[in-house]
Amino acid sequence: MMKCKWYLPLIAISLVVLIGLTAGCITIVRQEPAAPASTQQGPTAPPTINAFTTSPGSIISGQRTTLSWDVSGAATISIQPEIGTVGSSGSLLLSPAATITYTLAATNQAGSTTNSVTVTVITPTNRPDLVITDIWLTGAVVNYTIKNQGNADAKPTWTYLYVNDLKKAESYVDILAAGEEKTETFSNLDWSFPGAAGDPGSAVAQFNVKACADAGNDIEESDKGNNCLTKIWGQTFTYDFVKNAHLAKWRSSAGDLKWPMVSYDKKGAAYLLYDTLVMCPEPVSNGWIQGRFADFYIKYYGQETTSRELVVPEHAKFTARVGFKGDFSTDGVGVALGYLDATGSVVLFPKMDVYSDGTLRVYEIDLSDMAGKKTEFILWVEAKDSPEGDCVRWVEPKIVQEE
């Protein structure tokens, strides 16, 4: 008789139970919560230093230089040494005592950008330094003032007179002591000036009159680059942006604008207030407004005004005083002069920040490098983060021809 293996049924029952339990199991996987997405995105690139220059880059001790900068996309901007925190654009008139290197550092969340410029300061040597300080007309006689601003006596020299770059006369100058100034004349020239004698302002023509000290290079000077003085006699070029504002092409960040405009227009506005030009950018963060100015003229009598490019004269500069129209608490605005390049794109000169502190700030741009070029000019105003009430006044915005 076979013996029953009593444990075999037990093993079978155990296997059935285990299989049933396995089939009913649920696997739970724990997942970590996802990190919350950032609600603010910082800048993706470090700031851009559009311009950081000195003019001139080399001076004699005691003279001054203009340090200018223009930066975009920066949270903080600092110039060292000695200057410290500055705005996004501006300029300073400086007179360093010795050669110095200025470093601009612009920083945002994405990083920082730096640039440096050096001002070379020349200590005067024991030499004379002749300069012409004035030229004027008395009747038919051309007069000039010559000064030795060096620290040594100057032996006799000759001064030449040029009219429209042609030599017309010369004048002998005797010994000039250090610091001495004297008046001389070009006695061998009888000036027949068009218009009223002795009154350059009444003449129809225009003349570039230049007098150069030590024109024969007879002496060693501490500075040979300052011997000449040029003046413009006759009709000088002036372009008045206020008088031409109603003819300009106006546009804002909201689109084209049509003259006349009202100050409360939500697209931005430009209008005349007494003898000033008021410009209000679109009242949104970074809103802007621009006016495009040309040479406006009437081609034939009775026809509508048309326009052509302006020809930039020699020795020209843009000058204006800019301030807020009213007393508003804002982050200020950026203002700039610009022009159209050969492709029709707007190129802005260094911007200047204007604040609602009641101050009229002087804004000047040297246009001498553009002499002879044909272009149209742009007046630009850009709001910042608090744009309400950002209406600025341009007082006497003009392009003038300097003597």
Image (tube, rainbow, N blue to C red):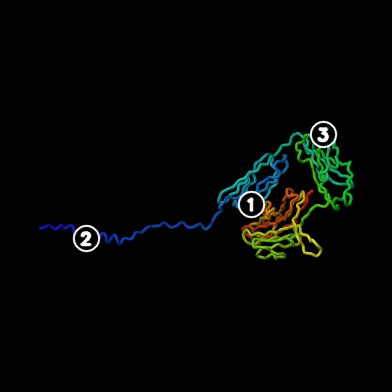
Q: What label sits on residue 155 in the rendered view?
A: 3
- Residue shown at the point (63%, 50%) measured from the top left: 71
- Residue shown at the point (62%, 47%) measured from the top left: 78
Q: What label sits on residue 366 in the rendered view?
A: none
Q: Amino acid at mark 1?
A: Ser
Dot 1 or dot 2, earlier in sequence: 2
Q: Position of residue 97 (x, y in %)?
A: 69, 40
Compared across the picture, whether 326 is left or right of 22 comes to: right
Note whether 265 is above or below 35 in the view shown. below
Q: Quadrant of residue 28?
A: bottom left
Q: Amino acid at mark 3?
A: Lys
Report, in whole angstroms, how far the alpha carbon at label 1 lies from the one at label 3.
Answer: 50 Å
Q: Residues within 10 Å of mark 3 (few under 14, many from 20)?
A: some
State the SS at label 2: helix
Q: Which residue is mark 1?
A: 88
Q: Residues within 10 Å of mark 1 (few under 14, many from 20)?
A: many
State the SS at label 3: loop
State the SS at label 1: loop
Compared across the picture, whether 322 is left or right of 182 comes to: left
Q: Quadrant of residue 7?
A: bottom left
Q: Which residue is mark 2?
A: 13
Looking at the image, the residue that sits furthest to the left is 1
Q: How many marks?
A: 3
Q: Residues within 10 Å of mark 2 (few under 14, many from 20)?
A: few
**Closest to the observer, 266 or 232:** 232
- Residue shown at the point (43%, 58%) measured from the top left: 33
Q: Amino acid at mark 2?
A: Ile
Instruction: Identify the image quadrant of the N terminus.
Output: bottom left
Question: Is there any visible trace of residue 329 in the rendered image?
Answer: no
